[in-house]
Image (cartoon, rainbow, N blue to C red):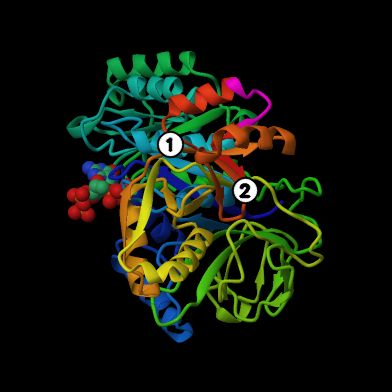
């Protein structure tokens, strides 16, 4: 069985993702750190190491992949940008992982972004381990937290441990499997005592534990891997408490690289042919160069440096001579990658998000969705002679996943769509810096976009009545531009032969 565990951390800002990431890397002896993790101590050294490589290669990778090893297991941690606003980038990163850790603040429970990210995980049946963080602070009752996870996310929850008190009263965590308490004064793995009944555990907590063990389902690895049950751990990322247990849980329970759906059937990781898909493209931060790094998740086969692979988008084979591999401590052995690993491929815009790469060019991975944007804006040029540049820029940036672009059937006012406000700022500054296009964003007459699917006849009949509400996306696919979500429901009801979809698979 593969020793790779490729996962992401999902959380609401401030729940402790950065702190936890840092502790995971420190415990695992991080190798390369390419990310926004606030570098401290060993992590800072690993990071500067990485920056040297960036300089040598003249590229810049801000938040992406962090790899560490522990007890013979290689962990690939994919960073999901932690802004209040999240972008499609975040969503797509979740298409490249086999499991996720959901970090919850013990005092706050499930927050809006946790829920959104969770929905994406559910869409792809990504199994989730829950880490209730900040138990060193006064939190809510453990039952309340567990019940909230169960109710809000419609998941079975299985506490794997139980905090003995919280905040100032916090005395440690009882691990149900070993029946041992680990205490906060030491490393969380240094068990300082066995459970000894009443002196160790206050009566009210002993009662809680009994109730918990009777009241929640037992751990069932199948249910977890199907995404129906989440095992719950407790700890403090800040105090490095409960982190080792979390890593062990990922090693033990989290699925190794999973088979991936494709139009040629399911592709298994033990297949011989090298295949993978691009889940993220990051443009160079240096505006003088148009180099990009495409991040490929390897699905099957053993990748070797210099190998020729064909991207489904262009259909033209490319030799991958200078892949960026995130896992090799020793650059010499960085020439191979296994399923579950991520490879960064420098390119000049030939690789697009959603592309499949393979040796034979016969496979197309499915299930890499575009999400309907939640914010739409009309793009207006300050200098109308720059229309061509604007079109090129919008095409490029939508290819990169920064924005989505919609070209209405009537009129020449292009609409951009984003999932989070931050993307709009990125759009404006990149238009200026990289394309020398000054643009402003105006209110859009539309509120919502839905991809349309249906027979040609049905689409045509719909277009006859609704042309002013139709647009084409970057790929030329039809999109219904609605003035309100009510409109979507209304049209869906009136046109049952059409599908109004909030996602689009490439
Ligand atoms: P994020 O990436 O999810 O946004 O969260 P981050 O790790 O940056 O943590 C947010 C704040 O919560 C930080 O405090 C951090 O120190 C604190 N924190 C994280 N884990 C724990 C924990 O287990 N216990 C306690 N008590 N606090 C925790 P800050 O003051 O905003 O930042 P900083 O100045 O400490 O860096």
Image quarter for residue 112?
Answer: top left
Image quarter for residue 142?
Answer: top left
Mark 1 vs 2, N-terminal side: 1
Q: Position of residue 224 (x, y in %)?
A: 58, 32
Q: Which residues are magenta?
A: 494-499
Magenta: predominant secondary structure element? loop
Q: How many marks?
A: 2
Identify the residue at image location x=22%, y=36%: 137
Helix, strand or loop status at disc 2: loop
Identify the residue at image location x=41%, y=39%: 446
Labels 1 & 2 near each other (Cβ < 8 A): no
- Disc 2 crowd rating (10 Å Cα; few below 14, some 14-19, many 20+) is few
In this view of the protein, which residue sits in the foreground, 395 or 240? 395
Helix, strand or loop status at disc 1: helix
Report the side of 146 relative to 344 (left or right). left
Report the side of 257 relative to 325 (left or right). right
Which residue corresponds to mark 1? 116
Q: Position of residue 67 (x, y in %)?
A: 50, 62
Image quarter for residue 389?
Answer: bottom left
- Disc 1 crowd rating (10 Å Cα; few below 14, some 14-19, many 20+) is some
In this view of the protein, which residue sits in the foreground, 145 or 173? 145
Identify the residue at image location x=55%, y=51%: 473
In the rendered image, the vertical position of residue 363 relative to residue 429, given as above or below: above
Is-magenta flag for residue 193? no
In this view of the protein, which residue sits in the foreground, 23 or 258? 258
From mark 1 to mark 2, how far is it between C-alphas? 26 Å
Whether residue 301 is visible, yes or no, is yes
In the current view of this chain or complex, which residue is farthest to the bottom?
Answer: 56
Which residue corresponds to mark 2? 477
Identify the residue at image location x=47%, y=69%: 388
């Amino acid at each position: 069985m593969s020793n790779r565990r490729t996962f992401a951390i999902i959380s609401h800002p401030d729940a402790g993702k950065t702190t936890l990431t840092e502790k995971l890397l420190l415990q695992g002896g991080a190798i390369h750190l390419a990310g926004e993790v606030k570098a401290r101590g060993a992590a800072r050294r690993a990071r500067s190491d990485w920056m040297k490589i960036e300089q040598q290669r003249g590229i810049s990778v801000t938040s992406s992949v962090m790899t560490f090893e522990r007890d013979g297991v290689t962990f690939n941690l994919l960073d999901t940008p932690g802004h209040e606003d999240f972008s499609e980038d975040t969503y797509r990163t979740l298409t490249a992982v086999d499991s996720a850790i959901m970090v919850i603040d013990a005092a706050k429970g499930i927050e809006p972004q946790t829920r959104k990210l969770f929905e994406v995980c559910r869409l792809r049946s990504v199994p989730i381990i829950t880490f209730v963080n900040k138990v060193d602070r006064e939190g809510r009752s453990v039952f309340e937290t567990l019940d909230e996870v169960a109710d809000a996310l419609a998941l079975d929850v299985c506490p794997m441990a139980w905090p003995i008190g919280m905040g100032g009263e916090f005395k440690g965590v009882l691990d149900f499997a070993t029946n041992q308490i680990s205490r906060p004064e030491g490393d969380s793995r240094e068990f300082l005592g066995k459970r000894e009944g009443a002196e160790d555990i206050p009566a009210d907590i002993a009662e809680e534990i009994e109730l918990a063990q009777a009241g929640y389902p037992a751990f069932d690895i199948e249910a977890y891997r199907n995404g129906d049950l989440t095992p719950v751990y407790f700890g403090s990322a800040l105090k490095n408490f409960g982190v080792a247990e979390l890593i062990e849980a990922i090693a033990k329970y989290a699925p190794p690289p999973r088979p991936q759906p494709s139009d040629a059937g399911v592709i298994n990781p033990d297949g011989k042919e090298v295949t993978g898909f691009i889940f993220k493209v990051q443009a160079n931060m240096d505006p003088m160069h148009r180099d990009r790094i495409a991040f490929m998740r390897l699905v099957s086969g053993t990748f070797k440096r210099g190998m020729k692979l064909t991207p489904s988008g262009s259909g033209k084979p490319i030799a991958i001579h200078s892949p960026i591999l995130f896992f090799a401590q020793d650059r010499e052995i960085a020439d191979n990658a296994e399923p579950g690993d991520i490879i960064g491929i420098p390119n000049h815009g030939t690789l697009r998000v959603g592309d499949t790469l393979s040796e034979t060019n016969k496979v197309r991975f499915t299930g890499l969705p575009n999400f309907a944007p939640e914010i739409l804006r009309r793009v207006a040029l300050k200098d109308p002679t720059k229309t061509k540049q604007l079109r090129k820029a919008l095409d490029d940036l939508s290819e990169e996943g920064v924005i989505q672009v919609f070209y209405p059937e009537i009129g020449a006012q292009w609409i951009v769509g984003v999932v989070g406000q931050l993307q709009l700022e990125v759009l404006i500054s990149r238009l200026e810096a990289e394309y020398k296009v000054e643009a402003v964003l105006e209110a859009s007459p539309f509120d919502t976009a839905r991809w349309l699917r249906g027979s040609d006849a049905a689409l045509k009949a719909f277009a006859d009545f609704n042309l002013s509400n139709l647009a084409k996306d970057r790929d030329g696919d039809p999109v219904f531009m609605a003035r309100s979500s009510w409109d979507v429901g209304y049209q869906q009801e009136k046109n049952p032969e059409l599908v109004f979809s909030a996602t689009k698979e490439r």
